[in-house]
Image (spheres, rainbow, N blue to C red):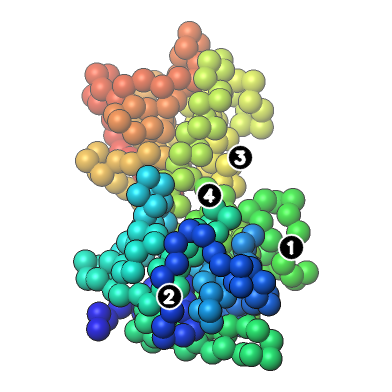
Amino acid sequence: MTKCNPALLPLLLLSLCGGGAAYADALPQEQVDSPAISVYLDGQPLRSEVPPLNVDGTVLVPMRGLFEAQGAVLSWDNTGKTVTASKDDTTLTYQMGTSSANLNGQPVEMDVPGVIADDTAMIPLRMASEALGNTVNWVPATQSVQISSAAVIYETSILQGVTLRSKPDGESKPVTENLLSAGTKVHVISVADALWLKVRTEDNLIGYISAKPKFTDYTSSSLTEKQAAALLAYGRTFNGTPYEFGASPDQTDTFDCSSFVKRLFEDILSVELPRVSYNQAKEGTKVKLNELRPGDLLFFTARGLDIGHVAIYAGNNKILHTYSSKEGVHTEDFDGQWKKRFVTARRIL
């Protein structure tokens, strides 16, 4: 039997019986008439638009919710009806309708193949669930499945009181009336976007919290990339905005180099940077030119000062900044005079 990585329990959908016939996309009428089934993971109900299916005693559960609940990256090949889920050093690949999956290059046999119901891929994997060391209990009285996964590590600390919301939206309903207070530990399930993290609390509440740096100590390459992209996209909305030396950072009609950078970081990420470039160059951590990534700050000599200008690295050897009354905010190549005048680079994200 192929051994599986315990991190993948909820990446796999479950089968409650040892045997069963093979099923394709079409489902039998007896399945449609089966009583509704509830599925719980570590005491939390797993809800989806498509309910669980009971095919002759085998329960099939929509896989996307289980993949994403454990922070896996999911991709779907519609042509081949193949799903691939990756987390850490584990990769699971499965083609719908077949009787085996591929887990880290090894075949994993299944008693019942997956089906597609209401455009949702659903896979029964009893053997995989048990091989992963998970406890699966069927409760006939309530027609429910109780799954107990491996212990969740609550790796992220709340730094400042933050609301746990039902959706990645500041206007969505709070999951609980109380803020998650400073010092509270949460497990980050996934990075929803540049501004939101999907998390699980120690009392098994699942929701979304702000991904802005002042709220948690969570970092990841995925979050950094999304936040840098959001920062640059916002900055480009000001293309052509006039340059004014000494412009106030409290308005967006004009900018100088450092007021522009300060405004972007504050508006998008609630990161407060000093007003002038010389002091901004003291923030974050120093990075080498060959280590640059989008969102890093680049500092240059200007006006006879050791540091008198700042720009944001935009990737592909481009910088976003402002210094000219003729061009205002714009993107240009990081070469020529800028390479000669370059002093240092700092990473804020």
Measured from the top left, where is residue 171 in percent x and y?
Answer: 74, 51
Q: Secondary structure at mark 1?
A: loop
Q: Which residue is mark 1?
A: 174
Cα–Cα gap, marks 4 and 3: 16 Å
Q: Secondary structure at mark 3?
A: helix
Left/right of residue 123 with respect to residue 255 in the rendered view? left
For disc 4, the neighbor class at 10 Å (few under 14, some 14 to 19, many from 20) is some
Q: Earlier in the sequence, mark 1 or mark 3?
A: 1
Cα–Cα gap, marks 2 and 1: 44 Å
Q: Give the mark toward the camera: 4 or 3.
A: 4
Q: Which residue is mark 2?
A: 21
Q: Which residue is mark 4?
A: 193
Measured from the top left, where is residue 113 in percent x and y?
Answer: 40, 68
Q: Which residue is mark 3?
A: 267
Q: Quadrant of residue 312?
A: top left
Mark 1 vs 3: CB contact within 8 A: no
Q: Earlier in the sequence, mark 4 or mark 2?
A: 2
For disc 2, the neighbor class at 10 Å (few under 14, some 14 to 19, many from 20) is few
Q: Is residue 11 visible?
A: no
Q: Give the mark toward the camera: 1 or 3.
A: 1
Q: Amino acid at mark 2?
A: Ala
